[in-house]
Amino acid sequence: MCRISRAPFIAVFLLLMSGCGGQSPSSPGGNPPSAGLVSLTVTDTPPAGVTVLFFQLGVTGATLTTASGGSVSLLPGSTTIPVNVSQLQTDSAFLGTANVAVGTYTGMGLTFANPQLTIYNGSGATIGSGANACSNNTVCQLTPSTTPLTLTLSSAPFPVTLSSAAPLAFKLDVHLNTVIQPDLTVNLAATNGVTVSLLPAPTTGQPVSSLAGLLGTIVGNSTTGFILQTGDGRTFTIAVNSSTIYNFPTSICADNFSCVTWQPPPIVKAVVSLQTDGTLLASQVTYMQPAGQTVVEGNIIRLSTSGGNTLMDMILQQGPSTPATTLLPFGRRVTVSVPPTGVTYAIDAEGFGFPVDQFPFPNGVSFASTTDLQVGQQVAVVVSGGVTATGSTPGFTSITGPAGITFSTNSITLEPSQITGTVTAVSASTLSFTLSTLPNYFVPPSALASSTPPIPAPVSITIQTTPATTYVNLSPDSISGLAVNDVVTIKGWVFSTPGGTTNVAVVAEDVLNRPGPTPLF
């Protein structure tokens, strides 16, 4: 979840734009002497105000402007590439790679389409107007009016010079606190609403950037990697090497390359990085479920009970390519029925450097039953049985009322959440600090139907870091670089604190320092 306002970036790379599930980014092969490699990423700066649960933009065009006024396309064909910006507070989304003629370029042209916005309004009053009017205490899925849909960016870092020996990697930053207006329209041309920067050249042997995890189905493989199809139907060609970590059940494979050749093809999550030659390299590949099952990932925004089951309301963020996604559209609020028994629980953290049985839990917490579920967690769930859609599956639903889409689950995996807030205390000796979240952020106590209002704010969170935690934009890049009143985004695993009503504990994977968000409303 992000606020209308990893520690890597929330970015989308403009190589050939692929996104959080992407267009087939195959290797560009050898570059001719007259061409150089260009890449692009997109990131998200979160704002204050309402809680943005989902914000997706389609990218339909990206060009570089030549010194003579011409343009060079960076995208393959006319495919619209959906980018889920709300999941990019600490990660980068890959768009693609392109071979471009060497020379000087004076700007970048971008064309967007199909914006989708889901918010929670806890401001105390209705916001927006007309079809975009969102009542207080309501989750609203909108198709906001957006202008303009075509942008030309010509300020710094332009002009830039591309050579065959020096690839260029651009990063787009979508500042949600600027582009989303008080009436819930979207103005992409707002001052500093969409900015572009040039990523620094990586050191020898290092990737251009780490990217967001890709959830999908392995649909092909070769001697050097595999092809992953994501929930929006796009495919990624992903390489592996001797350092790739495989997290698979022993009944399937021996945690080696044979895992990605397993038949029938499994549903996996791949953590990838962009290499200087424009290819994607997997640092880890984690087994999620066998083929034929549907796995979706989203944020818990409410917990309640009914008939002995726990009802877990989620905003869907991503999933594998499956016919079920027509009933489970991304950005939609759904209610998941979790029975008290017969459900498996896991933590997706092996790639963080800790085996599951050695994960650095805060004292007294666990993730093994419905009592460990927590508003603010991001989870991957297996859809068990059918999906029920009642009526027209409304896009405007009271947080205390039922969702229009329901299903059951028999497997829940805890994924890292993304949280933005202000540092209120730092304890370098215990590698921990406390964070006061911005108003209305969906972190506990759980939003029970009887709660009025359901989510008090702000909420105090204890952030536990480890030697494996990554720090970005701090000086030094360690917990010693944190100071009270710093505004930071945390990517980490949210745990329920036993007996607590206003506190939670988060184990941080990434800590990203950023300027304070500007309130929208």
Image: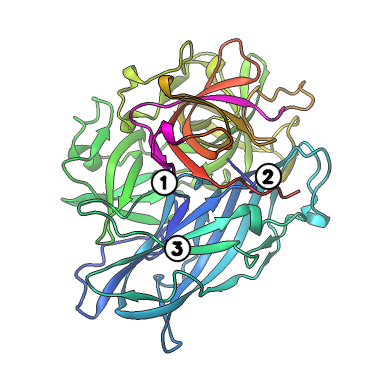
* Distance Cα–Cα, label 2 vs label 1: 24 Å
Give the amino acid type for the residue marked by disc 3 in the picture: Ser
Q: What span is in magenta?
A: 456-481
353 and 425: which is toward the camera: 425
Q: Which residue is mark 3?
A: 197
The disc, 3 or 1, on the residue closer to the chain's N-terminal end is: 1
Q: Position of residue 211 (x, y in %)?
A: 38, 49
Relative to 344, is 155 above or below? below
What's the residue at 49%, 71% (across, down)?
61
> Tag 2, which secondary structure?
strand
Tag 1 or tag 2, which sits nearer the N-term? 1
**Residue 8, which numbered label?**
1
Q: Position of residue 326 (x, y in %)?
A: 56, 48
**Residue 213 in sight here:** yes
Which mark identifies residue 151?
Answer: none
The amino acid beneath tag 2 is Ile
| Frontmost residue, 73 versus 426 | 426
Task: Relative to 520, say whether 278 is above or below.
Answer: below
In the image, 493 versus 250, the foreground residue is 493
Inter-mark Cα distance, 2 to 3? 28 Å
Residue 281 in magenta stretch: no
Looking at the rendered image, the disc whose residue lies closer to the viewer, 2 or 3, is 3
Residue at mark 2:
119
